[in-house]
Amino acid sequence: MRPLLVASLFASLPIALSAQTAIFPHGIVNVASYTPAGLPGGSIARGSIFAIFGTNIGPSTGVQVSTFPIAATLAGVSIQVTQGAATVAALPLYVSAGQINALMPSNTPLGLVSVRVTFNNLRTNPSTVRVVNSSFAFFSVASSGVGPGVFQNFVASDNQPVNSPLVTAKPGQVITAYGTGLGPVAVDNVAPTPGNLSTPVEVTVGGQPAKVLYSGRSPCCSGLDQIVFQVPDNTPSGCWVPVYLRTAGTTTSSAVTMAVDAQGSSCATDALTQTFLNGGKAGILSLVRTAVRQDVGVKTPSDITTDYFVYDLTQQKGGTFNFSPWFSMPPAGSCTIYGVGGDWTTTGLLIEGSTAAKLLDVGAFTINGPRGISGPQSLGSGSQAAHFGSAWSGSTLPNQLYLDPGSYSVAAAGGADAPAFQTSLIIPNPFTWTNRNQLGVIDRTQPLNIAWTGAAANQSLAIVGVSADLPTNSSAVFVCVAPSGASSITVPPAVLSALPASRLNAKQSKAVLYLGNLPVSNATRFTVSGLDAAAVTSLYMSGKTVTLK
């Protein structure tokens, strides 16, 4: 277990180096989650471990502390944290040319502070960050802040394996998790004293509140927090059950995942999931329609509808801890949360490692539906989506939509990785989001109810919410999944509070809610020679711009 924790604590991201000694813009983040500073969970807690990214801020070969007490200087690196006339020294734990991991002192002034690094008498630019009493983040196995968390299943005192899709936890089982950001302690530079910290803690597992048995420092390492909790009895099973933590009833962490199974067996029972984890050739073909009502920050409200064909056929590398946000979806009745840099409404990108070795060559695609034949669409080496057409209310542009409800066939001409094949599907009549147009200003402190009618009986729907804060170049995204056959879903305040509030200037913020059926859970499996698993599906996403307060 210790090598895994050390890897999480001291993992360094690839950084392009230059001669200048500088901290990158927005380059100070929680070391476990990398949550951007513009998000509610992006502040740095007193007594927590944080990362500084920059150029020439430390030695070319990484150096980490190995003994107590921890000194204020390591390998020529020191860190000054200043607010007005008050200055404290952050404690460096790991230093390198591109990344520093350090401990924010427990007596750091609250609020905005200025951080500067000195390396061999060269000082960086000051970088501003907000310091709070608590803001927790779980460590993940991949050291990326998302995907499987560093969780241990308690079997016996000498048997605590790392949780994974192959080593699942049962409801009722005790779990030990690791993170940073629970809050301050009396002394930072010596081995921590075990004991619960005073910060109130709520842990949610698969949408269910968990009983917390311990929340305090791990005795091994300064700034490293240990959370011991019990998996709720009614936790849904799944390979990627989301877990998040809220401190002091206000600040919610990004989510990591754990694997849960009622019998403690492997959760990978589906062929697509098995191929994703074990490696092989697999993919999903999707016919996608998005319909978004835009009425925030515009003079005239409009409805924009767009049709796509999305093909995701890849050679998967495989890996027990593989994770891809739009494949590794939470189970029904639960929500997951992501914090990312950039404007998600433009990029649609979430943090993930590369799980695919290459795109598969299956030749050009031809789609045949109620509006006739569309094709061929070639599988390129870059984009994996083809645009059919759009319709924009109030515009003089013609309606070029293609994906009307009805029967479709999707045929591939065949290529180097698979012979020619054909499959079929039915696009059902779209559901109706009944309270969509009544949603304008969303209060993040209150539950948000989303209701619909007309969904197919076997469809599972999800609500996706995003808020992009443009001045800080940061976005938060949540995904909540409803049970199959449900007609409504409620997003809890703990999840909504992870999104940044909209700014008074509507041009500085973007907030959108999307309701749609899940492509993976609603997909139809089919067999293709040369592929280990394949599926075809249709996806309808209804969207609405909103304001968050």
Image (spheres, rainbow, N blue to C red):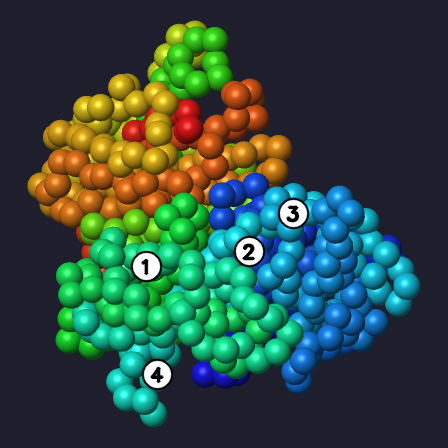
- Does 526 sit left or right of 184 as displayed? left
Task: Examine the image and state in which quarter residue 324 appears.
Answer: bottom left
Numbered mark located on residue 203 in the image: 1
- The amino acid beneath tag 1 is Val
Give the label on residue 452, or none. none
Cβ atoms under marks 2 and 3 closer than 8 Å: no
Q: Residue at x 31, y 78 (%)?
A: 153
* Residue depicted at 36% across the width and 40% down the height: 496
Residue under the point 25% across and 46% down: 481
Which quadrant does the N terminus fall into? bottom left
Quote the CA–CA distance across marks 1 and 3.
Answer: 26 Å
Q: Earlier in the sequence, mark 2 or mark 3?
A: 2
Q: Position of residue 42 (x, y in %)?
A: 54, 48
Name the kind of residue labelled 3 in the image.
Val
Numbered mark located on residue 129 in the image: 3
Residue at which label 4 appears: 161
> Between tags 2 and 3, which lies in front?
2
Q: Is residue 376 left or right of residue 432?
A: right
Q: Earlier in the sequence, mark 2 or mark 1?
A: 2
Quadrant in which residue 51 is drawn? bottom right
Q: Which residue is label 2 attached to?
A: 45
* Mark 1–mark 4 distance (CA, rounded to whole Å): 21 Å
Q: CA distance from mark 3 to mark 4?
A: 37 Å
Amino acid carrying label 2: it is Ala
Name the amino acid type tagged 4. Pro
Foreground tag (2 vs 4): 2
Mark 3–mark 4 CB contact (< 8 Å): no
Judge the density around disc 3: few (<14), some (14-19), many (≥20) Cα neighbours within 10 Å.
many
